[in-house]
Amino acid sequence: MKLRLVLFVALLTLGAWLGQSMLQGSGYVLLSYGSWVVETSIWVGLILIVSLAVLSYLSIHLIVAALQAEDRLRQWRAERGAHKAMRKTVQGLLSLAEGNWKRAQRLLVSGAHGETRLINYIAAARAAQQNGDFDRCDELLAEAASTTKGAELAVSLQQAQLQLERHQYEQCLATCLRIRKQFPKHQYANKMLLKAYMALEDWQAVVDLLPQLIKHRLILGKAAAQLELKAYSALIEHIVKGRSAQSKDAAAIMKIWRQVPKAVLEHKEFIPVADGFVRYLIKLDAQKQAESLLRHLLTQNWRSDWVRLYGWVKGQDEQKQLLFAEDQLKERPNDAMLLLTLGRLSLRNELWAKANEYLQASLAIKEDAETRAELGRLYLAQGDNTKALDMLKQGAALHPLPDLPLPQADELQ
């Protein structure tokens, strides 16, 4: 209120001063340019100058406003287009979520505008994939890569994921390897690479990739342990069932076996795999490797069938093989199968009396035709035909035979 009053008083004072000045004298202004001469009073000149200034200001303001109007119109059109594109994008994403693949693809492509084009094309590619149009899917991914600088990694990862879903494992493998080469520090591609290797049953590649996945925590805890178990089990089974030259090379397959982590070897689900592997070594006549492996396995899992196999194989040092079995007897003095194995290992070391003792001890704990056959063979080699025949008869009695006619002794003369 006070400011308005001050301004009002100031304007009155200025008006009064101007009126008084104009009454005192009109002044004189003369402008000459060439043949043109303008003569007027000073006050009219001032009014003309002020009017010209105001007119110039208004003209400039109108020109600027006209130029800004064009920019505003252009901006309005852009905002309207962006709003329309955003509406189509939202509708396209909703259609994608609802499973309306064709409508989703159409809306997303038509709504590809500005900074959201990358998202639109990738989402449209997924819609095309779900619709079974794989060629159009690849075209949309290529368009997505061209829309945004630096989007190659994101698009390549999407492409690998879609190739996995199509069961195009070789193509996915190629895409993932390309990503690893171009972006060596990016680890997510390794997760899809793992899926491709597993689908292609390239278990050696899976095993080689596992340490990196575990290191970068792409697989954790129980999932990592289960994957290790599955990968190494499949790799060993592939070797056992394989027909390649490597599968028949005992040194080569033992090198692979030594890669198996201790946690996997000790897992109960790995026992059948280990059993198959050791029997495969015996089949290859890799006796030394089989004995060494059996000795290691028996310290982790005491199994009667492995104890029996240990008596069949011939290790590198037969005396150490016998000593190992005798050490086990201290903890298992009444194990009939272990005593049978000790009898055989004693025979291998040409310790005839000790072999007899072990075999007799085994037979005293458990009646077994195999043990009687081993004793009978020993008696026969020692020339004790009576005991040998007795063992044969008693062993046959363990397995009932049909009642069949047999020749009498006098009929054979």
Image (tube, rainbow, N blue to C red):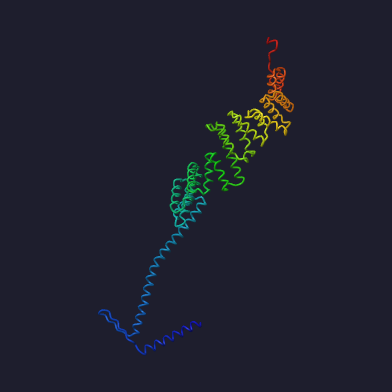
Q: Give the image location of residue 50, x and y in percent.
A: 37, 80
Q: Give the image location of residue 39, x and y in percent.
A: 29, 84
Q: Give the image location of residue 340, x and y in percent.
A: 69, 27
Q: Is residue 122 above or below residue 50?
A: above
Identity of the residue drawn at 66% across and 29% down:
319
Viewer-side residue, 312 vs 10 = 312
Q: Is residue 265 above or below residue 39?
A: above
Viewer-side residue, 56 vs 277 = 277
In the figure, residue 379 lies in which quadrant? Answer: top right
Which image quadrant: the C terminus?
top right
Q: Is residue 329 left or right of residue 251?
A: right
Q: Is residue 68 left or right of residue 354?
A: left
Viewer-side residue, 145 vs 282 = 282
The residue most toward the bottom is 24
Q: Is residue 407 above or below residue 211?
A: above
In the figure, residue 78 lies in which quadrant? Answer: bottom left
The residue most toward the right is 364
Q: Is residue 174 left or right of residue 62?
A: right
Q: Is residue 69 above or below residue 116?
A: below
Viewer-side residue, 47 vs 70 = 47
Q: Give the image location of residue 81, x and y in percent.
A: 43, 60
